[in-house]
Image: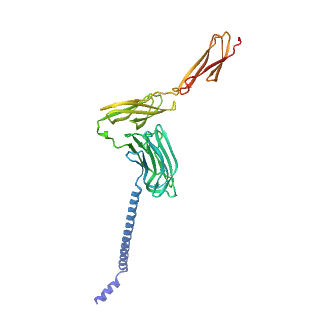
Amino acid sequence: MGRAGGTQFYRDLPIYWIAGFRLYADITQMIMYRDRTLQRLAIIALILTLSAIFAAHATAEETTVYVDAPDFVSSSTFDAEIKIENVYELNTGEFHLLFDPNVVNVTDVTAGSIENMSIMFTSVRCDKIQGIGIIKVLFDISGTGGASGSGSLATVAFEVTGTDGNCSILNISNTEYVYLFYEGELGNVSAGEITAEWENDIVCIGGPSSSEDGPEAKVTIFVENRDDDDLTVYLYIDGDYEKCKEIKDESHVEYCDGRRLTEGVHTFEIRWHDYDTDKDYVKTEERSVSGTTAVTLRTDEHTEDDDKISAHVYVKNLDDDDLDVYLYIDEAYKKYKSVSSGSVGDYGEYEFEKDEDALHSFRIEWSDSGT
């Protein structure tokens, strides 16, 4: 009776209760399915996020190009390697290397490789700008996919031309050293630019100086431009290149403030190019330094007429008649004038280069109707 009544109870329930029960059951299953789907999506999203983080970390490693050379050289030759790290799809590029030719000189440049991908040189040029040696190398990568990873762009072989204690810059960066010098460039397979850090080096001849423990002087160095044009002036101390600056006409610039030098006599040298005369000039001075010392170096004033001498030619007619007088200088005809009796003819001024012969010939010819 009770079972029958229970059965009847369920049978007599309104349909929406039964439907509501079924609906509730379906929603529960949907919610459980949805939760499992969201969990899977969350795991996938986490994996993608971690992958993006690791990828961003991998690509965030900055490309670096640097000079790898020994700090000190005791032999007559050595190599400096131009290395590159963390590059991606490198396809082409160029670099400049600056050095002091009074200390070292280039004898050869050989191409390197990056992860078994060979570097191909398209141009290698060695020159001298304002007394500073410069190598310009343009290169390409063999293959269409470019080179990725780390390796060597080139190896530069040097011979030693200086003496113990001399040092030379090995710079592929810092435009302060040479006017119109630019850092290198790297390009990828998509013809885009690869941003990189360019790091310099320095090499010294001989071993570490044994005089480092001696007394030191702090030297402030000024360079004064006495010319009427702006000049780019290079400073050398004891034969080693120090720095270069552009100085306005008739002004002075501080090159070093408290530069540490061992007490005693040192050589200070400035070099510059004067565009008026189109010549290079060098001025060297020896100064004794101790304690706190100031040194001022001065350029010389030059004009475009500095290397020329001139002669103004006059011809006096001592004859009784007027004469037609022809002037020749160094056997070359220059001018003709008619000069009255007893008067002086002005034939003008003539210039000669100083490096020409010291002796010059002046000759006049005329015809005398009286004879």
Q: Residue at 34% of width from left, 82% of height from top? A: 13
Q: Is residue 315 left or right of residue 286?
A: right
Residue 247's spot in the image, x, y percent? 43, 33
Q: Quadrant of the C terminus?
A: top right
**Residue 200 picture location, percent across and down:** 41, 45
Q: Quadrant of residue 86?
A: bottom left
Of 245 and 159, the residue lying toward us = 159
Q: Nearer the viewer, residue 72 or 10?
A: 72
Locate residue 226 relative to residue 305 in the image: left or right: left
Above or below, comparing residue 41 to residue 143 in the picture: below
Q: How was this image coloured? A: rainbow
Judging depth in this view, the residue of 49 and 69 nearest the camera is 69
- Residue 163 in percent (x, y) is at 39, 39
Tell me how many marks there are.
Answer: 0
Q: Quadrant of the N terminus?
A: bottom left
* Residue at the limit of the structure toward the top, as seen here: 320
Q: Is residue 171 above or below residue 218?
A: below
The image position of residue 233, as x and y in percent, is: 44, 34
Residue found at the far bottom of this picture: 1
Residue drawn at x 36%, y 73% as measured from the top left: 32
In this rendering, the answer to whether 297 lies above or below 174 is above
Q: Nearer the viewer, residue 159 or 265?
A: 159
